[in-house]
């Protein structure tokens, strides 16, 4: 009798060493390109229905800011399974340890002609409000989150793929307590013909040294086919190319963000304050995707707002 064993997707010792040195690993294939294309053809219509979304505030319903793209895994079955896929979770647990929460997800669309996203790092995610959204234990002032960025459409240089500066994840060049000022009319910056912005903010407002500039000569472009994903520290210097408009297909990334269960999420607050407004966290919950939560710091969601158990159909 042959006993079948589940495949292991944990990072190998070599992959883990590379990750700690560079701050990222991948890309890895999760869905075949045609499979991803078919999934997104269906999902882009279904996700227009926000009736079960956790954020029902006017700011989110308007769709005018990125908050409308937050945490759709909390109401959509496919995304609820996606964030818990073993191909993702086992790799993340290789880095963070066995007890892991997914605390946020976001869509990152880039349409033909859109500017690139400016260079940035994120540690406590206090960059917009000045109030930490995640806090690591032990009084640590440096932590960040593991981001798993999956290409739902092809992400090439011409369509605005990610860029990383390897090895920059160990120290912060930005002071998130300074707080950025939101202005939807914020102009883009241009260097060597590359247009960049940051969703109505100027990330340079947070620079510890106002004269510092990232060493773009070390940047690497992370091209991915639809259905591939990459894993990186949020404290890694990252950006994206502009969408050159050579194709009418938008570039779409879906990012899940992961932390150990020991991290406090949205500590001492009941709202997200970003993009010139607030949304309520009344219906929010983090998702336990691996191990157990013995800390009890955070509100945990066990199923979507539509009653689908997290990861129940993950393969």
Image: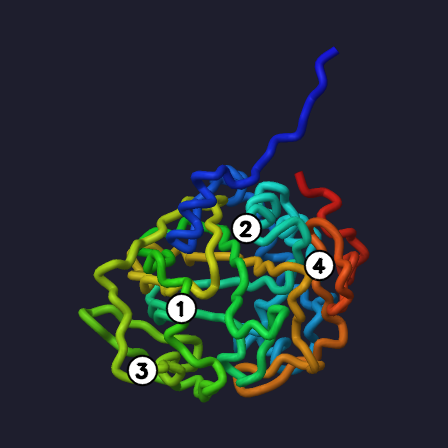
SS at mark 1? loop
Looking at the image, residue 196 lies above or below residue 72:
below
Circle 1 sits on which residue?
171
Q: Residues within 10 Å of mark 4 (few under 14, many from 20)?
A: many
Q: Residues within 10 Å of mark 1 (few under 14, many from 20)?
A: few
Q: CA distance from mark 4 to mark 3?
A: 37 Å
Q: Residues within 10 Å of mark 3 (few under 14, many from 20)?
A: few
SS at mark 4? strand
Q: CA distance from mark 2 to mark 3?
A: 30 Å
Circle 4 sits on which residue?
287
How far from the left and from the top, in percent, is residue 288?
72, 56
Dots 2 and 3: beta carbons under 8 Å?
A: no
Circle 3 sits on which residue?
209
Of the image marks 1 and 4, the number of the one nearer the N terminus:
1
The residue that appears at 35% across and 70% down in the rendered structure is 119
How far from the left and from the top, in percent, is residue 230?
46, 50
Dots 3 and 1: beta carbons under 8 Å?
A: no
48 left or right of 248 in image: right
The residue that appears at 66% across and 55% down in the rendered structure is 100
Q: CA distance from mark 2 to mark 4?
A: 18 Å
Of the image marks 4 and 3, the number of the one nearer the N terminus:
3
Give the residue at the far top of this rendering.
Answer: 1
Q: CA distance from mark 2 to mark 1?
A: 18 Å
Residue 160 shows in the view: no
How far from the left and from the top, in percent, is residue 24?
43, 52
Residue 301: quadrant of the picture: bottom right
SS at mark 2? helix
């Amino acid at each position: 009798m042959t006993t079948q064993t589940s495949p292991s997707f944990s990072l190998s010792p070599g992959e883990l060493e590379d990750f700690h040195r560079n701050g990222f690993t991948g890309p890895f294939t999760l869905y075949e390109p045609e499979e991803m294309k078919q999934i997104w053809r269906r999902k882009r219509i279904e996700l227009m229905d926000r009736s079960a979304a956790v954020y029902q505030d006017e700011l989110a319903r308007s769709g005018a800011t990125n908050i409308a793209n937050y945490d759709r895994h909390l109401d959509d079955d496919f995304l609820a399974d996606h964030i818990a896929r073993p191909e993702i979770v086992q790799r993340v647990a290789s880095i963070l340890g066995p007890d892991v929460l997914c605390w946020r997800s976001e869509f990152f669309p880039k349409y033909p002609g859109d500017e690139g996203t400016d260079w940035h790092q994120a540690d406590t995610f206090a960059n917009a409000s000045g109030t930490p959204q995640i806090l690591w234990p032990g009084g640590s002032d440096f932590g960040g989150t593991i981001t798993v960025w999956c290409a739902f459409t092809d992400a090439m240089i011409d369509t605005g793929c990610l860029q990383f500066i390897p090895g920059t994840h160990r120290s912060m060049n930005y002071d998130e307590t300074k707080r950025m000022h939101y202005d939807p009319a914020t102009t883009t910056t241009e260097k060597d013909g590359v247009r960049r912005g940051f969703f109505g903010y100027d990330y340079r407002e947070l620079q510890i040294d106002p004269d510092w500039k990232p060493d773009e000569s070390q940047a690497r472009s992370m091209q991915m086919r639809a259905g591939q994903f990459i894993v990186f520290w949020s404290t890694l210097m990252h950006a994206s190319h502009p969408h050159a408009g050579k194709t009418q297909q938008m570039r779409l990334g879906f990012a899940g963000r992961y932390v150990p269960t020991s991290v406090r999420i949205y500590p001492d607050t009941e709202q997200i304050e970003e993009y010139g407004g607030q949304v309520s966290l009344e219906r929010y919950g983090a998702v336990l995707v691996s191990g157990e939560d013995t800390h009890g710091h955070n509100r945990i969601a066990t199923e979507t707002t539509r009653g689908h158990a997290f990861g129940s159909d993950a393969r």
